[in-house]
Image (cartoon, grey):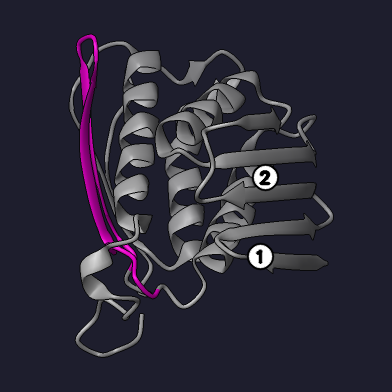
Amino acid sequence: MEEIMTDARQSRIHRKTGETDISVSINLDGSGQAELDSGIGFFDHMLTALAKHGGFDLEVRCHGDLHVDGHHTVEDIGIALGKAFAQALGDKRGITRFGHALVPLDEALCEVVVDISGRPYLAWNVSFVRERIGEMDTDLFEEFYRAFAMAASIALHVTCKAGRNAHHIAESGFKAFARALRMAVALDPRVAGSVPSTKGVL
């Protein structure tokens, strides 16, 4: 079951399956406010960074089958959030479209490049030095980014250029993701409300 509500650069989605029950809302022109309850503390920490550094108002509520593991929760939040992001963008008129960011956190350095292209793709070049951060499996980060990219129909490249501490690598990545998205969704007055594509559609 899926319910979608859309307003100007805002969207709300309720997605319910046999594994998760998720409510997500996003305001692309917010002030970085976040209300989060994924059931996974470290994931909430990362989504807080996404909202804060992206300048998005973000609300995520999830009841998932965490007695199994965190996979369904993280992947399904990625799907719901990606769909809400795409819905909030609408026909993409006037957006910058491309975004990139290179963000350090102490010894860690991650780069994220985004193209709001309508063609979903994830290039993932990140490795972690341990299997878990808090109660979150580190291999779930790739699942989140892939789910978001597919649902939002964006091309997304995530690369870790340096880092030893798993917490620092993950957080550097989410902050870079936030800044790249912020750049890509920003309205460009020079395009005067047109779609930033030679095809005329994204």
Amino acid on which the number 1 mark rests in the picture: Asp
Q: Residue at x 20, y 11 (%)?
A: 107
- The vertical placement of 119 against 178, above or below, is below
Element type at mark 1: strand
Residue 114, image x, y percentages? 28, 55
Residue 26, image x, y percentages? 61, 49
Q: Quadrant of residue 111?
A: top left
Q: Which residue is mark 1?
A: 7
Element type at mark 2: helix
Q: Residue furthest left?
A: 161
Mark seen at residue 72 = 2
Residue 51 lies in the magenta stretch: no
Magenta stretch, residue numbers = 93-116
**On the picture, is 12 further left or further right than 83?**
right
Q: Quadrant of residue 37?
A: top right
Mark seen at residue 39 = none
Q: Residue at x 32, y 22 (%)?
A: 169
Q: What crowding class fits label 2: few (fewer than 14 Cα within 10 Å), some (14-19), or many (20 or more)?
A: some
Q: Is most of the magenta stretch helix, strand or loop?
A: strand
Name the quadrant of the N terminus. bottom right
Name the quadrant of the C terminus. bottom left
**On the picture, is 20 further left or further right than 114?**
right
- The vertical placement of 152 against 54, above or below, is below
Compute the Cα span from label 1 to label 2: 28 Å
Mark sitting earlier along the chain (1/2): 1
Q: Residue at x 25, y 52 (%)?
A: 99
- The vertical placement of 192 against 63, above or below, is below
